[in-house]
Image (cartoon, rainbow, N blue to C red):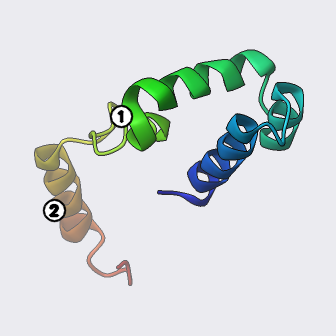
């Protein structure tokens, strides 16, 4: 888990124990009170993995296809081989 996710967990534990209010937790995590409520609900329903970003482990929609990347690299090697490109 990331440092930010660990910070959320600690803050939500303090919130559940009553040592923090929703407003204090929101201010500490730089989120709205509504976001705090949503995160609490997700944590209750999904456990710790509910705090992880849902796109984790997925390939980016903006990625360059391998075939296109290979073609570009080959063209660069062919036309710019005299330059010191790495």
**Does residue 25 appear left or right of residue 6 in this picture?**
right
Question: Which mark, residue 71?
Answer: none
Name the spot of residue 28 as percent of width and height, x first. 84, 43
Viewer can see residue 54: no
Q: Tell me the residue at 66%/52% (across/down).
A: 10
Q: Tell me the residue at 19%/41% (across/down).
A: 65
Residue 85: name its quadrant.
bottom left
Q: Tell me the residue at 79%/20% (across/down).
A: 33
Question: Which mark, residue 74?
Answer: 2
Residue 64: name its quadrant.
top left
Q: Secondary structure at mark 1?
A: loop
Alpha-carbon distance for marks 2 and 1? 21 Å
Mark 1 highlights which residue? 62
Tell me if mark 2 has few (under 14), some (14-19) or many (20+) residues whose alpha carbon lies within 10 angstroms of its own: few
Q: Is 82 or 53 nearer to us in this picture? A: 53
- Outermost residue to the left: 67
């Amino acid at each position: 888990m990331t440092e930010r996710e660990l910070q959320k967990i600690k803050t939500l534990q303090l919130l559940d124990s009553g040592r923090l209010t929703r407003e204090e937790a929101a201010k500490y995590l730089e989120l709205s009170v509504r976001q705090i409520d949503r995160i609490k609900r997700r944590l209750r329903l999904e456990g710790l993995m509910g705090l992880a970003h849902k796109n984790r482990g997925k390939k980016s929609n903006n990625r360059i296809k391998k075939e296109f990347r290979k073609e570009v690299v080959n063209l660069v090697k062919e036309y710019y081989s005299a330059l010191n490109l790495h």
